Image: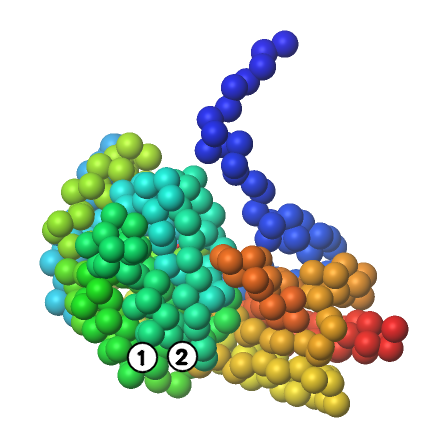
Amino acid sequence: MTTWKMAARAEKMNPSVLREILKVTDLPGIISLAGGLPSPKTFPISAFADACAHVLANDGAAALQYAASEGYGPLRQAVADMLPWDVDPAQVLITTGSQQGLDLVAKVLIDPGSRVLVETPTYLGALQAFSPMEPTPVSVASDDEGVIVEDLVAKARGTAGAASEDAARFIYLLPNFQNPTGRTMSEARRAAVSAAAKAANLPIIEDNPYGDLWFDEAPPLPLTARNPEGCIYLGSFSKVLAPGLRLGFLVAPKAIYPKLLQAKQAVDLHTPIFTQRMVVEVMKDGFLARHVPTIRALYKRQRDAMAAALTREMKGLDVTFNAPIGGMFMWARLPEGIDTVKLLPKAVARGVAFVPGAPFYADGQGDPRTLRLSFVTASVEEIDTAIAALAATLREQLAH
Ligand code: PMP
C-alpha cells in the first residue's frame, strides 16, 4: 500500500465547518435558509441560450481556443465601464469567480504568519481561501457600520510601527450587505476607514459581490474608488447573472497586478473564454440595467417577508435581527442560553435549516446566539413556514 506523505499545509486543511453543517440541510423536505444561493428565478436562461448560439455561430473557434490570462478584452472593458470610478481596463483581471480573486490575493500577499485583518464576523470562504498560505487572521472590532477605525489602526501596526515586518499585510473588507451580517458600511465610516488605511499604509482588499443588489438606494462609493492605489477590488457576476458561470474579476493597481496575473496563470491559465464571450453577448444593449432591477425587487419582497415573519413568529421572545438594505442575508440573535450550533439539528428535525453564526468569527470568539438566514432562495410561502418552524423549535428549547 502506498503511504502518501502530505504537505504540512494539506495536513492543516479541514473540511469547512459550514459545508459539514450544510450537508444536513440538503435533505428532502427541509426548507433551507442556510445556503448562499441566489434565487434560480433570476437566472436569465433564454438570454444565455441565445448568446451561446450566437457565440458558437460567429466566434466558435475563438470561443473554444486557449485565450489570454488577463481575460477577454471586451469583458475587461465592460467591467471598467460598469464601475463607478475611473478604471483602466488594463488593471482588470478576469477571474474564475471572485473566490479565485481571494486565492490569488492570498498567494501574492501572505507569508506564513503574516497578520491579516478581517471584520468581526467575516466571510468564511475568505478565511478558507487565505488559510493555505498560513496567515494569522486578526479580527478587528466591528459594529453595525463595519470595522471600528481605532481598532483597525491599532492592529494594522507592527511592533515597530507601520514599516515593521510584522505590520498587517492587508485588511479584508465587505462594505456592502456583508456576508454574513447583511450590514453596510456608512459613508462616514468609509471615509474614515479609507483615510486611516492610507495613513497606516495598510492595503485594503474590498470584496463586493452583493453591491448591485440594493433595495432602495445605491450604497456609498466603494473604498477602492477613494484610493485605487491602495486597494484591490473584487467583483462577481454570480449574483447579477448566475454563480454557475464562475465568473468574477479584480481590479488591482499597477504595483501588484503583474504578480496577481502570474499567480492566475499558474492556477488555470485563464478563465473559460467561452463563458466570457457569452457573458459579453448577454450583456450587450444594456441587459444588466434591465435585469438587475428585477432581482432587487424580488429580493426586497423576500426581505420584507422574512422580517414580517420574524416579527410575527418571535413575538415575546428576546430575538433581535437586522433588516438589511440589500444583498441576501439577515443576521439574528436568539435569547440568552441558546447555542445555535446545538439548535440546528432540532430545527432541521422540524424542517428548517439556517447557518450558526459562530464559524464566521476568525478569532473563535463567535457569539453562540447568532445565526445567518438567507431570504432569497426559499419562496415567500416557504419563508413563512420556515420561520414558524424555527420559532416552534426555539420555544420548545426555552421550555426545557
Ligand atoms: N465573497 C463573498 C463575500 C461571497 O459571499 C462569495 C460567494 N458566497 C464570494 C466572494 C465568492 O463568489 P464567486 O466566486 O461566486 O464570485
Mark 1 residue type: Arg
Q: Would you call the spot at circle 2 few (<14 residues within 10 Å), some (14-19), or many (20 or more)?
A: some
Residue occupying image coordinates x 22% and y 37%: 262
- Residue 297 in the image: state x and y as whole percent: 45, 79
- Nearer to me, 242 or 197: 197
Q: Quadrant of residue 340?
A: bottom right
Q: CA distance from mark 2 to mark 1?
A: 7 Å
- Residue 212 in the image: state x and y as whole percent: 35, 71
Per the image, the residue denoted by label 1 is 189
For marks 2 and 1, the one nearer the N-term is 2
Quarter in which the N terminus is drawn: top right
Mark 2 residue type: Glu
Residue occupying image coordinates x 31% and y 79%: 189
Image vertical order of residue 101 relative to residue 44, above or below: above
Per the image, the residue denoted by label 2 is 145
- In the displayed orientation, state which residue is furthest to the front: 160
- Nearer to me, 141 or 54: 141
- Residue 279 in the image: state x and y as whole percent: 31, 54
| Side of 342 relative to 110 (left or right) | right
The colour scheme of the drawn protein is rainbow
